Structures are given as C-alpha cells and as structure tokens.
Amino acid sequence: MRIGELAQAAGTTVETIRYYEKEGLLPEPDRGGNNYRSYGQAHLERLRLVRNCRALDMSHEEIRAILALADDERAGCGGINDLFDAHIRHVDERIDELQQLKAQLLALRQRCGPARSTAEDCGILHGLSAMQAEERPERHTHLG
C-alpha cells in the first residue's frame, strides 16, 4: 500500500508517518520501480503500536525500548512489564506534580473573591507578585 493508504488505515497523517520513519520508529518501506514507498501489513501493525504507545503518553525512548523488546524473539514479557511499571510510576509522579499545581492555583484564586473593578485591586495579581516560585524539576523520562 502507498503512504496515503497506510495513513488512512492507521487513522493518522502522511506527515506523522514520515516523522516516525525519520525518528526510526517505523522501518523504511520498500520502494517500487517508480520510487514510491510501498508499505505492508507489518508497517501498519508497527504504526498502530507506536500510535497506541503515544496515546499512553510514552516517550519516543520508551517506544524504542518496547520496539526493541518486541523485535527480540528471546525477550519475553518481563522487560515490557518492567517498562510499563516504570511508566506507571512516572505517571504517578506527574499526577502528584499536577495536584501540587492545582493547590497553588486554588490558593491564588481564593485571594480574589468577587471581581474587582481594577486590576490594581486583584488579589490574584498581588499573590502572583508576592509568591516565591520554586524551581520546577527538570522533566525527563524515567528510562536510564
């Protein structure tokens, strides 16, 4: 199948397919005599796997690790289970960060009850000016 047909079958765009190829998440397709890309069922299955991993908010590094394990006939499920357990821990950490962010936003919102007539009287703006922002930890994948 051609790239447009693959995109339609996978529910994605041609640009996404080209990007995943460039990133090494999809193997290079065969090329016909007319130099058009020719994709097969294996490309469709891999593309669906990549898209589903992205839907689970996995990083490209995590997806590469899953693909490497999937391509290793000797790997079994242990490594994939470990990777998913690590991703779940990472999601838990992000949930904690978001709950802290929500608490900060709620505290700021409580500083200003009904709308004031001028921005100068806004409790939220005063709170933003007075608060000590903490350095946010650098985000990184939980893989190696």
Image: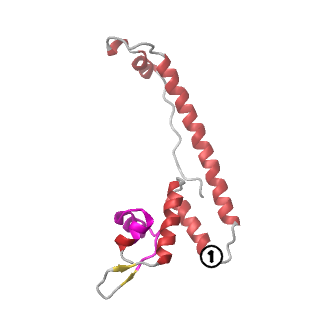
- In which quadrant is the N terminus drawn? bottom left
105 up-or-down from 57: above or below:
above
Q: Position of residue 37 (x, y in %)?
A: 35, 79
Count of picture labels: 1
**What residue is shown with label 1?**
72
Q: Residue furthest bottom?
A: 33
Say how the picture is coloured.
Answer: secondary structure
Residue type of the residue flagged with mark 1: Asp
Q: Residues within 10 Å of mark 1 (few under 14, many from 20)?
A: few
102 up-or-down from 114: above or below:
below
User: Is 110 colored magenta in this rendering?
Assistant: no
- Which residue sits at x=48%, y=61%? 51
Q: Position of residue 141 (x, y in %)?
A: 55, 53
User: Is 11 colored magenta in this rendering?
Assistant: yes
| Front-lying residue, 92 or 128 | 92
| Front-lying residue, 56 or 22 | 56
40 up-or-down from 66: above or below:
below
Q: Position of residue 52 (x, y in %)?
A: 52, 60
Q: Is residue 80 left or right of residue 46?
A: right
- Which residue sits at x=37%, y=72%? 5
Image quadrant in which you'd find residue 84: bottom right
- Residue 22 visible in the current orientation: no
7 up-or-down from 35: above or below:
above
- Highlighted range, magenta: 6-29
- Which residue sits at x=33%, y=16%? 119
Q: Secondary structure at mark 1?
A: loop
